[in-house]
Amino acid sequence: MITMEFLRRPVLVLTGLLVIAGRATAKDDLSTVLLVERPDHFILCNKYQQRLTPDEYRQLPAVLPLVVVREFDRLNDGLTPCLSAEVDGSPMYLMRAGDGLFARRGNGGSTITCRNALLLGDTVLLLGREALRLRPAGAGPVLALTPRVRAVRLFRSAGQTFVRLLSGTHAGAGGWVVLPESPEGSTWVRATAAQGQRPDAAAITTRLLPLITGANRALASIYAELSPASSGGLPSPVFRLAATEDSLICSVEPHAMSGAFAGSMKAMLPECERALLGTGVRPRLSGESIVIPLH
């Protein structure tokens, strides 16, 4: 027999997992950012405090900026030491060894701590009227940037701005550039969706897939804990991303259970927004689904 308590329990737990505490964005709100070069050589856990899968490691940039929440923390087991942080507003945990140093899963890699960093997170157009060069946070040559490159300004620290390039020859690279604080000069302006090409369905799916995969993994784990007698043999619902002619739609299957997961879908919306930061795409709630317009 399927009870209301059975339906309510996974919904409430998943909603709690998906709700992310917002960070203040006032200019005087300074943070500590840890730049992790070669993050695949460190032990990282996702927001569910599960170790990243090989696929999740492959999706990380060569230099991963972690906004530090607590430098010395422990996982929910109360035993495992870690650094707790956020990536695009979503929790991530960097494991520490018994000596307090960061635990590793391979040789190589390094970390740089940037204190008193001003978080930015906006998309800009680097005009190229003045010579701009990107200095990598880790190993690698200094890159000369071509005019009209789009980039996300992630944060500013010690007079320099850490950016992630979105277009051009070096798209995907991250590093430091020297930019004036005001966009009124000849170096950069804030970008709008009209100044760049919107991503296609495949690019949007690539950004959203880790989020949906993680939510489904958490949901499957919750249902696995329920006894057959409690579940009545009902299979675990899943979040699906389906394409239509002009949009992508994230919904719950089976559809008969979508109403019970309305709160989880609402909690997932801001995470979708963060995953699509800098693309000009604005997901929205529509009924019991999230709609991501393609045009």
Image (cartoon, rainbow, N blue to C red):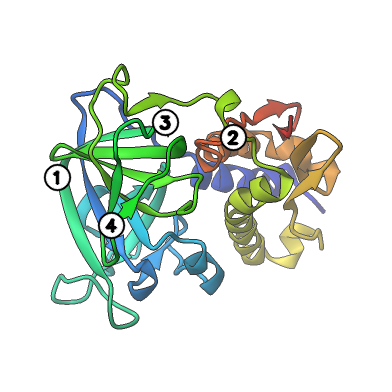
Tell me if residue 283 can be seen. Answer: yes
Instruction: Tell me the quarter of the picture where residue 195 sits.
Output: top right
According to the picture, the residue beneath numbered tag 4 turns out to be 142
Q: Residue at image x 58%, y 42%?
A: 12
Q: Is residue 290 left or right of residue 277?
A: right
Which quadrant of the figure contains the C terminus? top right
Q: Mark 2, mark 4: which one is toward the viewer?
A: 4
2 or 4: tag closer to the N-terminus: 4
Q: Secondary structure at mark 3?
A: strand
- The amino acid pointed to by label 4 is Val
Q: Residue at image x 81%, y 58%?
A: 234
2 or 1: tag closer to the N-terminus: 1
Q: Are marks 2 and 1 in contact (CB under 8 Å)?
A: no
- The amino acid pointed to by label 1 is Arg
Residue positioned most to the top: 184
Camera-side residue: 285 or 25? 25
Q: Mark 2, mark 3: which one is toward the viewer?
A: 3
Q: Mark 3, mark 1: which one is toward the viewer?
A: 3
- The amino acid pointed to by label 2 is Leu
Using the numbered discs, state the Cα–Cα distance from disc 2 to disc 1 in whole angstroms: 30 Å
Q: Residues within 10 Å of mark 3 (few under 14, many from 20)?
A: many
2 or 3: tag closer to the N-terminus: 3
Q: Secondary structure at mark 4?
A: loop
Q: Residues within 10 Å of mark 2 (few under 14, many from 20)?
A: many
Q: Secondary structure at mark 1?
A: strand
Q: Is residue 221 left or right of residue 43?
A: right
Using the numbered discs, state the Cα–Cα distance from disc 3 to disc 1 in whole angstroms: 23 Å
Q: Position of residue 139 (x, y in %)?
A: 26, 67
4 or 3: tag closer to the N-terminus: 3
- The amino acid pointed to by label 3 is Val
According to the picture, the residue beneath numbered tag 2 turns out to be 269
According to the picture, the residue beneath numbered tag 3 turns out to be 124
